Image (cartoon, rainbow, N blue to C red):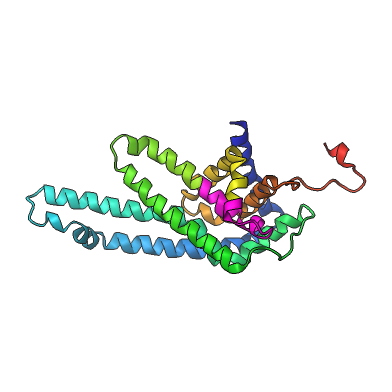
Amino acid sequence: MRSFFSGMGYLGRGLRLWITSPRLMLLGAIPAVVVGALYATGIVLVALNLDAIAGWATPFVRQWAEPWRTDIRVLGSVAVIGAVVLLAVFTFAAVTLAVGDPFYERIWRATEKSFASDPGDDGMPWWRSALGGLRLFLTTALLGLLLFAGGLIPVVGQTVVPVLGAFIGGWFLAVELSGFAFDSRGIDLRGRRRMLAARRSRTLGFGVLTYLLFLVPFAAIVIMPAAVAGATMLARDALPDVGSRPPPAAGTSASADE
């Protein structure tokens, strides 16, 4: 539990950049605003056409007597809007990172330089990074659908599944958001998962808190840039011989810092 709560602290450290680098963080909020607006528009369009979508999804109830026909279509409408919202939450980070790659790269570099570190541009080819991002997107979308289906199970769907969703969603958020730090060092998706798994509790602490805050309306606009910075620090701690503590001040020995 100590490691789990310690992992939450990475997001807090990322949020400090809003005080020290507000212009950079505002720049990083732009992709979240754009993707959030697109997602919100899509959800509204689905909501406005729920009757037609529910009718298309439940053709077998057309000959049923009332109130069963109406009840089934209402349940179908709730299921559709629930699935859309859950998919939006699970895929938001992957899409936002893809859209705002140049913006978040600047935040990642600023975070690295704050520790007197700049890994440079040598890393994975762009196409391998893109394939890894696409694979994460498809995986999170599939998991979102599976969790939604599990949420329809009485009792379990209202107790166990939401908790499971937060942990699974938090894990994949941490994997996605830490991509810049790992990719720049030539570490692929498999290696990224392995290194984060070695600090699983700490990784989950960061990811679960970020996931839960993403559920708050408009919070992702503020949280997304900070999460990229926090994930960079998390990744640095997971890498061998790399730390996320600031370098010792001039004239201060490493032993004194310990």
Magenta span: helix, strand or loop, mainly? helix
- Which quarter of the image is occupied by the C terminus? top right
- The answer to whether residue 31 is visible is no
- The answer to whether residue 29 is visible is yes
- Which quarter of the image is occupied by the N terminus? top right
Q: Nearer the viewer, residue 204 or 44?
A: 204
Q: Position of residue 198 (x, y in %)?
A: 62, 41
Q: Nearer the viewer, residue 225 or 101?
A: 101
Q: Position of residue 96 (x, y in %)?
A: 52, 61
Q: Position of residue 195 (x, y in %)?
A: 63, 46
Number of numbered labels in the structure image = 0
Residue at 32% x, 47% y: name it.
149
* Quadrant in the picture for residue 182: bottom right
Residue at 71% x, 66% y: name it.
121
Q: Nearer the viewer, residue 146 or 50?
A: 146
Q: Position of residue 227 (x, y in %)?
A: 60, 52
Classify residue 209 as left or right of residue 75. right
The residue at the far right in this view is 251
**Does 180 appear in magenta?**
yes
The residue at the far top in this view is 1
Identify the magenta region: 171-191
**Does 167 appear in magenta?**
no
Classify residue 72 as left or right of residue 66. right
Classify residue 4 as left or right of residue 150. right
Q: Taking 166 as reference, is 220 above or below it? A: below
Q: Taking 198 as reference, is 111 above or below it? A: below
Residue at 46% x, 52% y: name it.
217
